[in-house]
Amino acid sequence: MSWSISHSWQAPTFVATSTSVGSDLLVASGLELFLLDESGGVRWKRSMPFKVHAAEHASGQIAILCGHGFHILRASDGSQIGEGRATSGGFSDLMSRPGGGWILACREGRLHLFNQEGRGIKRLESGIVRRLVGWFDREHLMWQDDRGRLRCARLAKDDSQRLLEDRVWSWVSRMVGGKVLLQSADGNLWEGVPHPFGWDGIETIDTRSLEPVAANRAGDGWWVLSVEGKLFSMSGGEDNESVGANLGEFLVGLAADTMATITRSGLVRFWQAPELANLRRAEMQKNLAEAKMSSDWEERKNIFQRARQAEDEGRLSLAVDLYEALGRAEDVNRIVARLRGD
């Protein structure tokens, strides 16, 4: 598969972090945030009081870690939602939660769960988290602990956590499509399909003893950015190390056929693979479907809030109608029993 640099963009100063916002690219440069479109144009920028050292996008929102605080921005214009939250020592990593909300790891060894508006829900004593890896579903979260082992927590009424196994990994990617890329102590790279109690499958896919700093799962498989700033394909395709330049420390997937590499000094390179255009179209259709589901979820949440309000105000017939619209039979039966005086 032939990947090539389509265009570049230079940030004004050093880059602390970067993430995808749909097919756009968020770059934290110095004390400024830039949202770049696919052609490298600046959609918006905003200044922050401290440098942003982590960012994540989900459902039209961008969550950022800035100083010791956690803030949520609107992806459309960069404006802030709410007042933000902070903790002593600050946060080290964050990730969106399926169905809405955010999970954050703090430097004091706890996981903090927030709702979609940035209000705290609960905290879990987790120990120091090296990296948040991914969600199996809305309740089961996997992360890498400070010793390099993989752990899974069940965030429900009674929180619990367990080790997936005793094996130590020197590096682990984020989970994408149910798969993770891992480096073992001997330098080999593995691809695994984890579940909350172990592995559905895991195999060695590269034995070149690369030192990965970032990975992206594109339309033609995994790509790894090494500590030397070289790009390597894990699917047996063409490596892009022949470019002869240090591509940087950040690798961000923007679509099935588009990714970006970014240097600390601020040089952003956009990569494209024209042969993957059909996969990109399929990805766009999937994103549109997910966006519709997200809006439907928001509407359901609004209806539920109206039903709860109607119930609290004693307008029980209206509450029954709203709960019926949501298919919440238990709530309907409960209110009907109240109407009957049971």
Image (tube, rainbow, N blue to C red):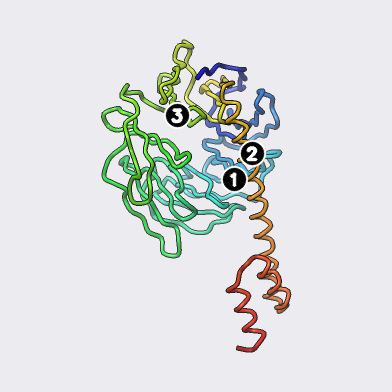
Nearer the camera: disc 3 or disc 1: 3
Q: Earlier in the sequence, mark 3 or mark 1?
A: 1
For this orientation, the residue located farthest to the bottom is 341
Res 268 visible: no
Amino acid type, label 2 = Gln
**Which residue carries the number 3 mark?**
222
Nearer the camera: disc 1 or disc 2: 2
**Element at badge 1?**
strand
**Pointer 1: residues within 10 angstroms few (<14), some, or many (20+)?**
some
Amino acid type, label 1 = His
Residue 285 numbered mark, or none:
2
Examine the rendered structure and indicate whether residue 227 appears above or below residue 90.
above
Q: CB under 8 Å between callouts 3 and 2? A: no
**Residue 133 image position (x, y, % from top left):** 43, 42
Front-lying residue, 311 or 62: 311
**Pointer 2: residues within 10 angstroms few (<14), some, or many (20+)?**
few
**Which residue carries the number 1 mark?**
71
Q: Earlier in the sequence, mark 3 or mark 2?
A: 3
Examine the rendered structure and indicate whether residue 171 appears above or below residue 86.
above
**Residue 202 image position (x, y, % from top left):** 33, 38
**Residue 302 image position (x, y, % from top left):** 69, 61
**Element at badge 3?**
strand
Cα gap from disc 3 to disc 2, whole angstroms: 22 Å
